């Protein structure tokens, strides 16, 4: 079994850890296959309610392993096949009803941005940096970046980002909307886990992220119909009935307290 990405599952939370620190977690063919395998596993396991994506070492992900690409006898055809494998994992995570948080430290570049943007919530270290770098090696964006990036930061900024050698620091990435929050380097892991655990025990979070993720790629009428069906299905669950009853009890208690104070 490959250890290029580690999987740990505990109490409904799956942690995927990119694990090629000596190569700044650059993605090679073995790691790409492992990514697909684990993404399909965690999105098909009904016991998993949330996913935390992090990385070992000083960087989150430096993109594709350019050294391996250059030495591959398969050339461009091999790179296309590898991207297709990774894309299966990306699609599984993006379309699933499992919210994803990313803990990001150090450098994020190239395809690493695509992996990062699979996450719904991104906690970045103050020391994190973000760059395209595709044009530096004469290549074009992949791994969903031309879809994810404009959604996150807008088309104009996305074009500025991929058509220049711009490197964003963490605070600028936050201002642009590329990440959700910035914390001190020592707090990244704990904060990301805190976010992930806040989603556990309430399947409505997973369904909400699925609805939001699906909306840009389908007709508005389809989104409306899906919303209506999903909220109706949730109302019939024991979890929703319990939470609604608690909400009604709190509301009644507040109203009763207000009436007594005014008498």
Image: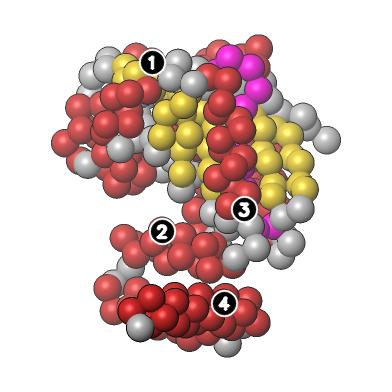
**In this figure, which residue is indicated by the disc labeled 4?**
246
The residue carrying pointer 3 sits among few (fewer than 14), some (14 to 19) or many (20 or more) residues within 10 Å by Cα, namely: many
Circles 3 and 2, Cβ within 8 Å, touching? The answer is no
Which element type, helix, strand or loop, lies under badge 2?
helix
Against 68, is 233 above or below?
below
The residue that label 2 is drawn on is 213
User: In percent of the image, x 23 and y 19: which residue is there?
Assistant: 164
- Measured in 3D between alpha carbons, the distance from the residue under mark 4 to the one under mark 1, in whole angstroms, is 57 Å
Within-10-Å neighbours for mark 1: few <14, some 14–19, many 20+: few
Of discs 3 and 1, which sits in the foreground?
A: 3
Towards the viewer: 241 or 261: 261
Of marks 4 and 3, the one in the foreground: 4
Q: Earlier in the sequence, mark 4 or mark 3?
A: 3
Prevailing secondary structure of the magenta residues:
loop
Quarter of the image with the C terminus in it: bottom left
Q: Which mark is residue 50?
A: 3
SS at badge 3: strand
In the displayed orientation, state which residue is furthest to the left. Answer: 156
- Determine the CA span between mark 4 and mark 2: 29 Å
* Residue 58 counted in the magenta span: yes
Q: Of callouts 3 and 1, which one flags the residue occurring earlier in the amino acid sequence?
A: 3
Instruction: Determine the residue positioned at 58% across, 20% down.
Output: 186
What's the distance in space between the residues labelled 2 and 1, CA to CA? Answer: 31 Å
Q: Where residue 49 sits: x, y (%)?
A: 65, 58
Magenta stretch bounds: 48-63
Count of marks placed on residues: 4
Of helix, strand and loop, which one carries label 1? helix
Q: Residue furthest right?
A: 1
Viewer can see residue 176: yes
Q: Alpha-carbon distance for marks 3 and 1? A: 35 Å
- Crowd around label 2: few <14 · some 14–19 · many ≥20 (10 Å): some
Residues 165 and 101: in front is 101
């Amino acid at each position: 079994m490959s250890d290029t990405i580690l999987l740990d599952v505990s109490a409904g939370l799956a942690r995927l850890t990119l694990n090629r620190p000596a190569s700044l977690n650059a993605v090679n063919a073995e790691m790409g296959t492992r990514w697909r395998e684990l993404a399909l596993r965690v999105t098909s396991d009904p016991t998993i309610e949330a996913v935390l994506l992090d990385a070992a070492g000083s960087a989150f992900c430096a993109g594709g392993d350019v050294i391996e690409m250059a030495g591959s006898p398969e050339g461009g055809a091999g790179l296309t096949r590898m991207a297709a494998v990774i894309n299966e994992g990306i699609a599984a995570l993006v379309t699933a009803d499992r919210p994803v948080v990313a803990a990001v430290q150090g450098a994020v570049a190239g395809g690493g941005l695509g992996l990062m943007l699979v996450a719904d919530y991104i906690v970045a270290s103050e020391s994190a940096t973000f760059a395209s770098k595709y044009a530096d090696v004469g290549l074009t964006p992949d791994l969903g970046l031309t879809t994810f990036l404009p959604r996150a930061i807008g088309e104009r900024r996305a074009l500025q980002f991929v058509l220049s050698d711009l490197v964003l620091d963490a605070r600028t990435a936050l201002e642009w909307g590329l990440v959700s929050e910035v914390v001190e380097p020592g707090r990244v892991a704990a904060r990301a886990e805190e976010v992930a655990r806040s989603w556990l025990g309430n399947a409505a979070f997973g369904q909400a992220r699925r609805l939001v993720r699906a909306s840009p790629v389908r007709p508005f009428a389809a989104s409306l119909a899906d919303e209506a069906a999903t909220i109706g299905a949730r109302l019939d669950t024991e979890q929703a009935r319990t939470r609604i009853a608690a909400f009604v009890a709190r509301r009644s208690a507040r109203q009763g307290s207000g009436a007594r104070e005014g008498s």
